[in-house]
Image (cartoon, rainbow, N blue to C red):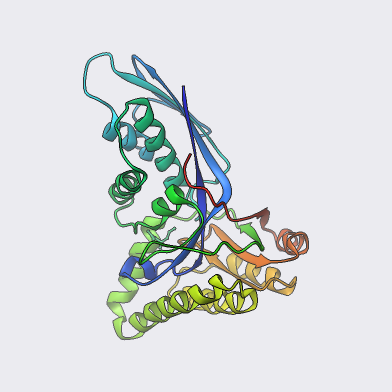
Amino acid sequence: MTEATASGKVYLFGEHAVVYGQEAICAAIELTTTVRTRQSDTISISSGLGNTGIDYCVHPYVSAAIETMMPEGEGCGIEVNIESELPVGSGLGSSAAVTIATLFALNKEFDKGLTKADIAKVGADIEKKIQGSASLTDTYVSTFGGVIAISKKQQLHVPDCAIVIGNTHEFSSTRKLVADVAALKNTHSEIINPIIEDIGDIARKGIGFVQKSDYNAIGQLMNVNHGLLDAIGVGTCKLSELVYAARNAGAYGAKITGAGGGGCMIAICDNPDDVAESITNAGGEATITHIRKTGVE
Ligand code: MEV
């Protein structure tokens, strides 16, 4: 049996703008997905979503990973079992984590000799195929861990403050949200293009503050980034309620993470219990986590 674990991610800065080549800063988190594989004579995939064979409705990412990695030949099969701490469709990179963990396990299982960089690239291609449009961010961060400035794939200093995640439990589709932002950008390019560039500027400026662990400045920029995400139409009332609940409880800063339209927000803080309680009282599900330094293993 082969076992692989890969992490989910949060964006400190730059989601959506990264799709247009802007800088973003993304961090792996201690919430992970574990995939166990065993060679067999048929293909089976089991997870909290159900038990299937190759099935692009229930297990699209794992199905694509198997079809990419599986050697050809009769009687060649694989059992894949998935256990995940990452809620699906919540902006925490659950699809990247399951894709990367599956590719990593199958790489060992079938002795394919791919490097981690190869796995990140194959994972990004799979995400693009399934989601229509995706940046390299989620799969890269899940593969390598830590805090990464995406444009140059630069590993940054890992801040040791807590991250509190607030889940709205509103389902969000990355594919739809990326398409909605593209449509808004087409219709009002003179307004939306500068906002996308401002989000990139925030991430570029944020690099220096992350390197110095300047939590006050990181928090201020996260708050501005949240406002700009709202402006490009990916906020929801519930997300903002949780963001303000976190800020009112003393977080340095709080914002949407991931595609928005529901899903999750994050706050960085030194008082995670207070922030988590405030998010819970505002109707969110709060999880306290930290940045995971290691990548897939
Ligand atoms: C989704 O986690 C982040 C987006 O920027 C899409 C992407 O980067 O692929 C919205």
Q: Nearer the viewer, residue 212 or 33?
A: 212
In this rendering, position of residue 35 left or right of residue 121: right
Which residue is found at the position 33% from the left and 19% from the top?
77
Q: Quadrant of ligand 1?
A: bottom left
Where residue 252 sits in the image (x, y, percent)? 66, 73
Q: Nearer the viewer, residue 248 or 13?
A: 13
Seen as rendered, the residue at the extreme left is: 73
Q: Nearer the viewer, residue 17 or 122?
A: 122
Question: How many numbered discs, if any?
Answer: 0
In this rendering, position of residue 182 left or right of residue 25: left
Q: Is residue 12 visible?
A: yes
Where residue 138 sits in the image (x, y, percent)? 42, 54
As displayed, is residue 190 above or below residue 170? below
Which residue is found at the position 55% from the left and 78% from the top?
221
In this rendering, position of residue 169 left or right of residue 281: left
| Location of residue 180 (image quadrant) | bottom left
Where residue 44 sits in the image (x, y, percent)? 40, 23
Q: Is residue 58 visible?
A: no
Where residue 241 sits in the image (x, y, percent)? 65, 69
In this rendering, position of residue 158 left or right of residue 252: left
Q: Nearer the viewer, residue 29 or 165?
A: 29
Seen as rendered, the residue at the extreme bottom is: 190
